[in-house]
Amino acid sequence: MRFKNKKVLITGGNSGIGLVTAKLLVQEGAKVAITGRDQKTLDSAQKELGENAIAIKADVLNSEERKNAMQLIQEKFGELDAVFANAGIIKQSPLGTTTEEDFNQVLQTNITGAFFTVQAALPLLKQGSSVILNGSVMSVLGLGGSSAYSASKAGVRAMTRVLASELGPKGIRVNAVIPGATKTPIWGEETPATQARLQAISRSIPMARIGEPEEIAKAVLFLASDDSSYMQGTEIVVDGGATSSPAGAPIYLGK
């Protein structure tokens, strides 16, 4: 098992990509700490993950909660081998109708929250450890109405390189995973309207389908493991070809 006796922190680990990543890590022998804001989903995740995980209620933007979370992790684990700064939110931000509050909330959660997660975890990260930031293909797609989210994820990609420069001399690797459209709770309830939207998006993806959270999680595990020991300040794009070869998508092939 690649992660036997390894300790990993995942923010936003109570659902979606974060929770699936935690499950795979536990299966491979890791001890995992997950954080989130919702106690109900944290309790559910704790039951799923079992005794090799701890679920901590903590908002990435609350300095006191971050501090308390790191103290608990230090007490339980002693140190960290990897951090997956996964917590994030998405809100539409069309020009002309978006409030400053909504815009700033997205930027603060997705960029500020990621930065201060890494900063808070730094004393626990040993030499040879790995930091993974969660980006998004939205940073390059130019999709209308997504200025806040797209800008925040572009910031995450830039910050990956900066943190790699800062933490590289300490023997810590920093990389990013860049998911495309993925089946997670972020899409809302599984209504006919949601299904129709996902089917439409699938036509713009060369692989003609939405990604599974396990497919993103496996890329995160690779970056967290020694298998990626010579990777620094870079990205793994997991998007079915949406950004690299869009001309191969069904919508452009008349399918």
Image: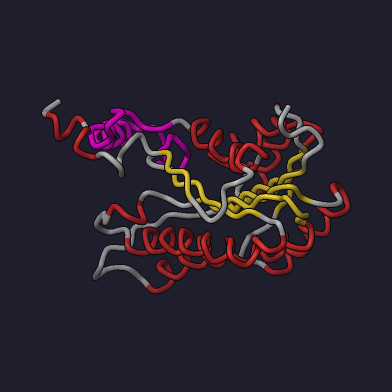
Q: Residue at x 59, y 55 (%)?
A: 174
Q: Residue at x 37, y 49 (%)?
A: 137
Which quarter of the picture shows residue 103?
A: bottom left
Q: Is residue 103 above or below residue 179?
A: below
Q: Residue at x 43, y 39 (%)?
A: 238
Left or right of residue 20: residue 158: left
Q: Which quadrant of the rendered structure holds the N terminus?
A: top right
Q: Is residue 126 above or below residue 188?
A: below
Left or right of residue 238: residue 142: left
Q: Residue at x 77, y 40 (%)?
A: 6
Give the percent coordinates (x, y) of residue 70.
78, 58
Residue farthest to the bottom, as pictured: 100
Which quarter of the picture shows residue 104?
A: bottom left
Residue 36 seen in render:
no
Which quarter of the picture shows residue 66?
A: bottom right
Q: Is residue 173 magenta?
A: no
Left or right of residue 134: residue 225: right
Q: Which quadrant of the rendered structure holds the C terminus?
A: top left
Left or right of residue 158: residue 220: right
Return the residue nearer the eye: 72 or 253.
Answer: 253
Residue farthest to the left, as pictured: 254
Give the percent coordinates (x, y) of residue 110.
50, 60
Q: Which residues are magenta?
A: 182-211
Give the percent coordinates (x, y) of residue 57.
71, 53
Give the percent coordinates (x, y) of residue 60.
63, 61
Return the residue nearer the eye: 63 or 248.
Answer: 248
Q: How is the image coloured?
A: secondary structure
Residue 20 seen in render:
yes
The total of numbered circles placed on residues is 0
Return the residue nearer the eye: 81 or 84.
Answer: 81
